[in-house]
Protein backbone atom coordinates (compact mmCIF):
# COMPACT_ATOMS: atom_id res chain seq x y z
CA UNK A 1 0.00 0.00 0.00
CA UNK A 2 1.82 3.07 -1.28
CA UNK A 3 0.65 5.87 0.98
CA UNK A 4 2.75 8.51 -0.77
CA UNK A 5 2.75 8.48 -4.55
CA UNK A 6 4.75 10.28 -7.17
CA UNK A 7 3.14 9.24 -10.42
CA UNK A 8 5.68 10.82 -12.74
CA UNK A 9 8.95 8.87 -12.69
CA UNK A 10 10.68 11.50 -14.80
CA UNK A 11 10.32 15.10 -15.95
CA UNK A 12 12.36 17.21 -18.38
CA UNK A 13 12.26 21.01 -18.27
CA UNK A 14 14.09 23.72 -20.16
CA UNK A 15 16.55 25.79 -18.17
CA UNK A 16 14.91 28.98 -16.92
CA UNK A 17 11.38 27.56 -17.03
CA UNK A 18 9.27 26.36 -14.12
CA UNK A 19 9.56 22.78 -12.88
CA UNK A 20 6.48 21.34 -11.17
CA UNK A 21 6.78 18.08 -9.30
CA UNK A 22 3.67 16.43 -7.94
CA UNK A 23 2.91 14.16 -5.01
CA UNK A 24 -0.30 12.54 -3.76
CA UNK A 25 -0.97 10.89 -0.44
CA UNK A 26 -3.71 8.65 0.83
CA UNK A 27 -3.43 8.87 4.61
CA UNK A 28 -5.31 11.89 5.93
CA UNK A 29 -3.45 11.59 9.25
CA UNK A 30 -0.24 12.89 7.68
CA UNK A 31 0.31 16.42 8.93
CA UNK A 32 3.82 17.29 7.79
CA UNK A 33 5.32 17.02 4.33
CA UNK A 34 8.85 17.32 3.06
CA UNK A 35 10.75 17.31 -0.21
CA UNK A 36 14.19 15.78 -0.55
CA UNK A 37 16.65 16.06 -3.40
CA UNK A 38 19.04 13.27 -4.27
CA UNK A 39 22.09 13.28 -6.51
CA UNK A 40 23.63 9.99 -7.71
CA UNK A 41 25.85 8.24 -5.15
CA UNK A 42 24.76 10.66 -2.41
CA UNK A 43 22.16 10.53 0.33
CA UNK A 44 18.96 12.56 0.04
CA UNK A 45 19.20 16.14 1.27
CA UNK A 46 16.35 18.10 2.79
CA UNK A 47 14.94 20.77 0.51
CA UNK A 48 11.74 22.26 1.89
CA UNK A 49 8.82 21.30 4.10
CA UNK A 50 5.28 22.32 4.93
CA UNK A 51 2.96 21.78 7.85
CA UNK A 52 -0.67 20.87 7.25
CA UNK A 53 -1.75 24.14 8.85
CA UNK A 54 -0.33 25.98 5.84
CA UNK A 55 -1.04 25.79 2.15
CA UNK A 56 2.18 27.31 0.88
CA UNK A 57 5.79 27.58 1.93
CA UNK A 58 8.48 29.39 -0.02
CA UNK A 59 12.25 29.29 0.15
CA UNK A 60 14.08 31.12 -2.59
CA UNK A 61 13.41 29.42 -5.92
CA UNK A 62 11.48 26.60 -4.23
CA UNK A 63 7.82 26.72 -3.27
CA UNK A 64 5.72 23.88 -1.92
CA UNK A 65 1.93 23.97 -2.21
CA UNK A 66 -0.39 21.79 -0.16
CA UNK A 67 -4.00 21.00 -1.05
CA UNK A 68 -5.35 19.01 1.91
CA UNK A 69 -8.78 18.39 0.43
CA UNK A 70 -7.19 16.79 -2.63
CA UNK A 71 -4.39 15.14 -0.59
CA UNK A 72 -1.95 16.64 -3.04
CA UNK A 73 1.24 18.62 -2.80
CA UNK A 74 3.52 20.06 -5.40
CA UNK A 75 7.01 21.51 -5.57
CA UNK A 76 7.64 24.44 -7.87
CA UNK A 77 11.16 25.40 -8.90
CA UNK A 78 11.50 28.78 -10.60
CA UNK A 79 13.66 29.38 -12.54
CA UNK A 80 15.00 25.89 -13.13
CA UNK A 81 18.77 25.56 -13.26
CA UNK A 82 21.03 22.73 -14.49
CA UNK A 83 22.08 21.99 -10.90
CA UNK A 84 18.46 21.14 -10.13
CA UNK A 85 18.80 17.93 -12.15
CA UNK A 86 18.33 15.21 -9.53
CA UNK A 87 15.77 12.78 -8.14
CA UNK A 88 13.17 14.44 -5.93
CA UNK A 89 11.40 12.52 -3.19
CA UNK A 90 8.21 13.58 -1.49
CA UNK A 91 7.81 12.42 2.12
CA UNK A 92 5.11 12.62 4.78
CA UNK A 93 4.79 11.94 8.51
CA UNK A 94 2.63 12.25 11.61
CA UNK A 95 4.18 14.81 13.93
CA UNK A 96 2.25 13.54 16.93
CA UNK A 97 3.91 10.17 16.60
CA UNK A 98 7.56 9.28 16.23
CA UNK A 99 7.92 11.13 12.93
CA UNK A 100 8.83 8.22 10.73
CA UNK A 101 8.91 9.50 7.18
CA UNK A 102 7.03 7.69 4.45
CA UNK A 103 8.62 8.35 1.08
CA UNK A 104 7.29 8.42 -2.44
CA UNK A 105 9.07 6.61 -5.27
CA UNK A 106 10.77 9.73 -6.59
CA UNK A 107 10.73 11.84 -9.76
CA UNK A 108 13.88 12.26 -11.83
CA UNK A 109 14.09 15.89 -12.94
CA UNK A 110 16.32 16.73 -15.89
CA UNK A 111 16.98 20.37 -16.71
CA UNK A 112 17.81 20.87 -20.38
CA UNK A 113 20.31 23.68 -21.01
CA UNK B 1 30.81 18.86 10.53
CA UNK B 2 30.76 15.17 9.60
CA UNK B 3 26.98 14.76 9.95
CA UNK B 4 25.96 11.14 9.33
CA UNK B 5 28.76 8.79 8.35
CA UNK B 6 28.15 5.37 6.86
CA UNK B 7 30.70 2.64 6.26
CA UNK B 8 31.43 0.83 4.05
CA UNK B 9 30.34 2.62 0.87
CA UNK B 10 30.28 -0.57 -1.18
CA UNK B 11 30.22 -4.26 -0.30
CA UNK B 12 29.69 -7.54 -2.09
CA UNK B 13 28.48 -10.43 0.05
CA UNK B 14 27.95 -14.06 -0.75
CA UNK B 15 24.61 -15.68 0.11
CA UNK B 16 24.57 -16.68 3.75
CA UNK B 17 27.35 -14.36 4.87
CA UNK B 18 26.78 -11.77 7.55
CA UNK B 19 27.90 -8.18 7.93
CA UNK B 20 27.30 -5.01 9.87
CA UNK B 21 26.63 -1.67 8.22
CA UNK B 22 27.98 1.08 10.41
CA UNK B 23 26.30 4.43 11.01
CA UNK B 24 27.45 7.21 13.28
CA UNK B 25 26.29 10.79 13.71
CA UNK B 26 27.94 13.68 15.54
CA UNK B 27 24.95 16.05 15.79
CA UNK B 28 23.58 14.66 19.07
CA UNK B 29 20.37 13.69 17.28
CA UNK B 30 18.08 11.48 19.32
CA UNK B 31 16.30 9.80 16.40
CA UNK B 32 18.06 7.48 13.98
CA UNK B 33 16.75 5.43 11.08
CA UNK B 34 17.77 2.82 8.53
CA UNK B 35 16.20 2.87 5.07
CA UNK B 36 16.76 0.80 1.98
CA UNK B 37 16.22 1.96 -1.57
CA UNK B 38 15.62 -0.52 -4.35
CA UNK B 39 15.81 0.55 -8.01
CA UNK B 40 12.80 2.64 -9.04
CA UNK B 41 11.40 2.52 -5.55
CA UNK B 42 11.15 4.94 -2.68
CA UNK B 43 12.97 4.55 0.58
CA UNK B 44 11.57 1.84 2.82
CA UNK B 45 12.10 2.03 6.60
CA UNK B 46 13.88 -0.99 8.07
CA UNK B 47 14.39 -0.04 11.73
CA UNK B 48 14.45 3.12 13.75
CA UNK B 49 15.50 4.31 17.20
CA UNK B 50 14.16 7.16 19.32
CA UNK B 51 17.12 7.12 21.67
CA UNK B 52 19.90 5.00 23.13
CA UNK B 53 18.59 1.60 24.15
CA UNK B 54 15.31 1.95 22.25
CA UNK B 55 14.72 0.45 18.81
CA UNK B 56 11.66 -0.56 16.84
CA UNK B 57 10.75 -2.20 13.56
CA UNK B 58 9.89 -0.29 10.46
CA UNK B 59 8.16 -1.41 7.30
CA UNK B 60 10.69 -4.07 6.12
CA UNK B 61 12.60 -5.43 9.17
CA UNK B 62 12.90 -9.10 8.22
CA UNK B 63 16.48 -10.28 7.85
CA UNK B 64 17.93 -7.37 9.81
CA UNK B 65 18.79 -6.47 13.37
CA UNK B 66 19.86 -3.24 15.03
CA UNK B 67 21.17 -1.98 18.33
CA UNK B 68 21.56 1.50 19.80
CA UNK B 69 23.96 1.44 22.72
CA UNK B 70 25.00 5.09 22.30
CA UNK B 71 23.38 8.24 20.94
CA UNK B 72 25.96 8.39 18.15
CA UNK B 73 25.92 4.87 16.71
CA UNK B 74 23.20 2.82 15.07
CA UNK B 75 24.62 -0.29 13.33
CA UNK B 76 22.51 -2.50 11.06
CA UNK B 77 23.24 -6.21 11.11
CA UNK B 78 22.53 -8.69 8.29
CA UNK B 79 22.84 -12.22 9.65
CA UNK B 80 22.23 -14.44 6.61
CA UNK B 81 22.55 -12.39 3.46
CA UNK B 82 20.06 -13.11 0.67
CA UNK B 83 19.89 -11.75 -2.90
CA UNK B 84 16.70 -9.88 -1.93
CA UNK B 85 18.85 -7.72 0.35
CA UNK B 86 20.75 -6.29 -2.60
CA UNK B 87 19.99 -2.61 -2.24
CA UNK B 88 21.33 0.79 -1.27
CA UNK B 89 21.10 1.38 2.46
CA UNK B 90 20.75 4.83 3.96
CA UNK B 91 21.12 5.78 7.59
CA UNK B 92 19.53 9.01 8.77
CA UNK B 93 19.17 10.99 11.97
CA UNK B 94 16.89 13.74 13.20
CA UNK B 95 16.46 16.03 16.17
CA UNK B 96 12.86 16.19 17.24
CA UNK B 97 12.25 19.88 17.83
CA UNK B 98 9.36 22.07 16.87
CA UNK B 99 9.64 23.19 13.28
CA UNK B 100 12.59 20.95 12.48
CA UNK B 101 11.53 17.58 11.22
CA UNK B 102 14.06 17.13 8.44
CA UNK B 103 16.32 14.11 8.42
CA UNK B 104 20.06 14.21 7.76
CA UNK B 105 21.09 11.28 5.61
CA UNK B 106 24.37 9.52 5.17
CA UNK B 107 25.76 8.95 1.68
CA UNK B 108 24.65 5.32 1.59
CA UNK B 109 26.05 1.80 1.44
CA UNK B 110 25.59 -0.09 -1.82
CA UNK B 111 25.27 -3.79 -0.99
CA UNK B 112 25.24 -6.60 -3.52
CA UNK B 113 24.48 -10.17 -2.46
CA UNK B 114 25.58 -12.85 -4.94
Image: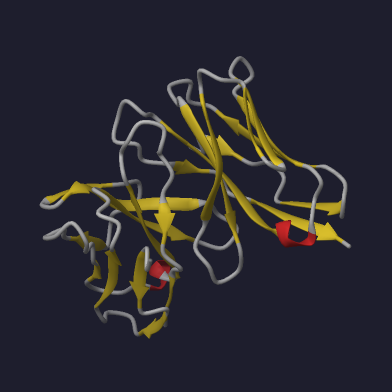
B62 lies above or below A77: below
B45 lies above or below A27: below
Residue A9, horizontal then vertical, whole percent: 70, 51
A97 lies above or below A7: above
* Count of residue discs: 0
- In front here: B57 or B30? B30
- In front here: A25 or B51? B51
Q: Please state, as top left, top right, bottom left or bottom right, where the C terminus of chain A lies in the image.
A: bottom right
Is residue B11 toward the left or the right of residue B24 in the image? right
Residue A93, horizontal then vertical, whole percent: 42, 34
Q: Residue at x 63, y 30 (%)?
A: A73
Is residue B113 toward the left or the right of residue B20 in the image? right
Residue A7, horizontal then vertical, whole percent: 68, 41
- In front here: B81 or A48? A48
Hey, which residue is sitting farthest top in the picture?
A69
Is residue B37 toward the left or the right of residue B18 in the image? right
Residue A110, horizontal then vertical, whole percent: 78, 58
Q: Residue at x 49, y 63 (%)?
A: A43
Is residue A49 toward the left or the right of residue A109 in the image? left
The image's colouring method is secondary structure
Q: Quadrant of residue B79?
A: bottom left
Q: Quadrant of residue A55?
A: top right
Q: Residue at x 23, y 62 (%)?
A: B74
Amino acid sequence: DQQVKQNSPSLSVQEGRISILNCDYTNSMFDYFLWYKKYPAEGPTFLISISSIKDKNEDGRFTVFLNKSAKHLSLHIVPSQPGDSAVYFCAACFTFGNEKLTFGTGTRLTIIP
Amino acid sequence: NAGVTQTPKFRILKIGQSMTLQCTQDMNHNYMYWYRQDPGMGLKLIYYSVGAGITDKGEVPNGYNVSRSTTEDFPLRLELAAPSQTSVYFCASSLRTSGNLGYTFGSGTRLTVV
